[in-house]
Amino acid sequence: MNKEEYFIKQFSNNKFIGDDGAFIDGFVYSMDAFFENVHFKKEWMSLKQIAYKSMIVNISDAIAMNARPLYALLSVAIPKSYSNEDLQELAKGFKKAASEFDIEIIGGDTIANEKLDISVTIISKTSNPIFRNGIKKGEILCYTGKLGTTKKDLEKLFEDKKISKKSKFIKPILNPEFFYEISSYVTASLDISDGLFFELERLSKASKVGFEFFHEIDEKIGTSGEEYEILFSFNKKNLSKIKKIAKKHKIKLNIFAKAIKGEYKTDCKNHHF
Amino acid sequence: MNKEEYFIKQFSNNKFIGDDGAFIDGFVYSMDAFFENVHFKKEWMSLKQIAYKSMIVNISDAIAMNARPLYALLSVAIPKSYSNEDLQELAKGFKKAASEFDIEIIGGDTIANEKLDISVTIISKTSNPIFRNGIKKGEILCYTGKLGTTKKDLEKLFEDKKISKKSKFIKPILNPEFFYEISSYVTASLDISDGLFFELERLSKASKVGFEFFHEIDEKIGTSGEEYEILFSFNKKNLSKIKKIAKKHKIKLNIFAKAIKGEYKTDCKNHHF
């Protein structure tokens, strides 16, 4: 058990912890850190891209619970060396994400620090929250999009190579409208932030099921983190409806396993900066 | 204008920013950072005290808006060197504050970092929020308790001297029940985190009033930050009711000014680590 898990375990009698966000009375509350040298290096991205991504990874949690983000609070620790132009760029990144997802930035805290450390709280709303514990045996597992590119791009960054500005590592792509539309058929979901295999472990633990894979999944695919694709389960009777909605939104579906009795564990280390 | 103010100004068309928290539909949302070497040095306090204070300074914002805190989200960046016992101490501090104020810790994020950097979001509820912009000319200004000791204690800490475990710098004292009871008479309020003079500037700006002091306030009193006493205004017709409630709760009241036409500015630098 690593330190972070050990720390979280101290709060383990807590009924809210364990999903992407906490669902209470129609609201979902989620909070994620996005710290320099923990989640990004400043050489890798512009300040605008950093601020934007810090919002997107949080918004992703809300969407994965089938919630519509409404408000954001920002805790932003800013190096003293930053110029006013730097601060403008940072603010632009936050505002761009807020505007794209129709979120109001309602407050937070700004302090001077050695490095750029951001925490974001998102308050969102849902009438039909989706949790991690809803998978029933026999249900189908599916993820959206193409996995593996962020792992490759992250490796390039560590080798001081350039990556495309369009890389999902820099600009994750969320598909809220697709997911909201299929949500009534979805029995469990989360976003792939720590790699498919690791997220499957989480689902297995929460839903108390194992998985029978339809085909082998390459480690390069299964351990690629920070993808922010959605992993979800559904009853196979709804497959054609989900396929139709995916087609409409031009979303690639990867149907790869079914839930069985048992437990799923991965030996692979998840790949996440 | 310092960097933090410049950054916040980028969001200045925002109707929510400017109070201790954002009031929306009966809820108050507030978020404050509590970072190592910005808000505390690790030699000054135990991990339990640090975690406890990080919660209290946030809870203070909720109370100053006349809101009852319900839920907390924690973003906790933890040095890799911390032992399991260290993590237990940290968790104990968070849980102690949560338990004292009947708050549920509902989630957040835990990451490995170079130093201990905490951000806390508090979600609270109120049917009668109090803002900073409610002071009318002629109203009375008052703060609770005794100001000046945290400044003195902070100076001692910088000189590597010991301070009492009971210092308000280590363990701020909040008086929620007193404040909730007088709240219907209060026209504006905030907590003294950056020093009385600085908070008065904020009130002056928000309420568009100046202040006529009843007696001179020493700089040692007016620039002592992190006091977490409450500064508030009220109509003098309610003075005896407020005095009676203060007596019941054993709260010292310092009635020191009245609101007048004009603007208040301080030349003093606020004193805050």
Image: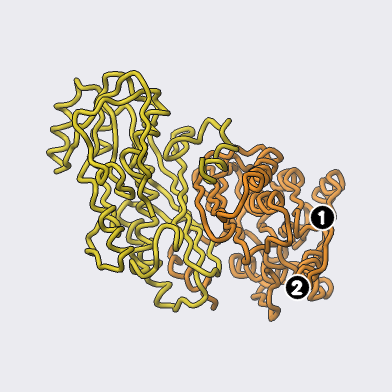
Chain colours: A yellow, B orange
Q: Which of the labelled discs sits on residue B30, or is there none?
A: none
Q: Could you tell me if residue B9 is visible in this image? A: yes
**Residue type at numbered disc 1:** Lys
Q: Chain of mark 2?
A: B
- Does dot 1 land on a helix, a strand or a loop? loop
Based on the displayed image, in which of its 4 quarters is residue B100 positioned?
A: top right
Disc 2 and disc 1: Cα gap in Å?
37 Å
Outermost front residue: A267
Residue at (75% x, 73% y) in the render: B212
Within 10 angstroms of label 2, few (less than 14), some, or many (20 or more) residues?
Answer: some
Q: Chain of mark 1?
A: B
**Residue type at numbered disc 2:** Glu
Residue labelled with disc 1: B165
Return the disc, 2 or 1, that comes first in the chain's sequence.
Answer: 1
Pick whichever, A129 or A172, lies toward us: A172
Residue labelled with disc 2: B212
Q: Could you tell me if residue A176 is visible in this image? A: no
- Does dot 2 land on a helix, a strand or a loop? strand
A64 relative position to B169: left or right: left
Residue at (78% x, 54% y) in the render: B237
Outermost bottom residue: B267
Residue B89 lies, in percent from the top left, at 68, 45
Check the image and report above or below for A215 versus B255: above
Pick whichever, B136 or A241, lies toward us: A241
Residue B268 lies, in percent from the top left, at 70, 79
Pick whichever, A37 or A85, lies toward us: A37
Q: Give the quarter of the figure containing the N terminus of chain B.
A: bottom right
A187 relative position to A91: left or right: left
Pick whichever, A158 or A251, lies toward us: A158
Based on the displayed image, in which of its 4 quarters is residue B69 positioned?
A: top right
Residue A174 lies, in percent from the top left, at 27, 48
Residue A250 lies, in percent from the top left, at 14, 43
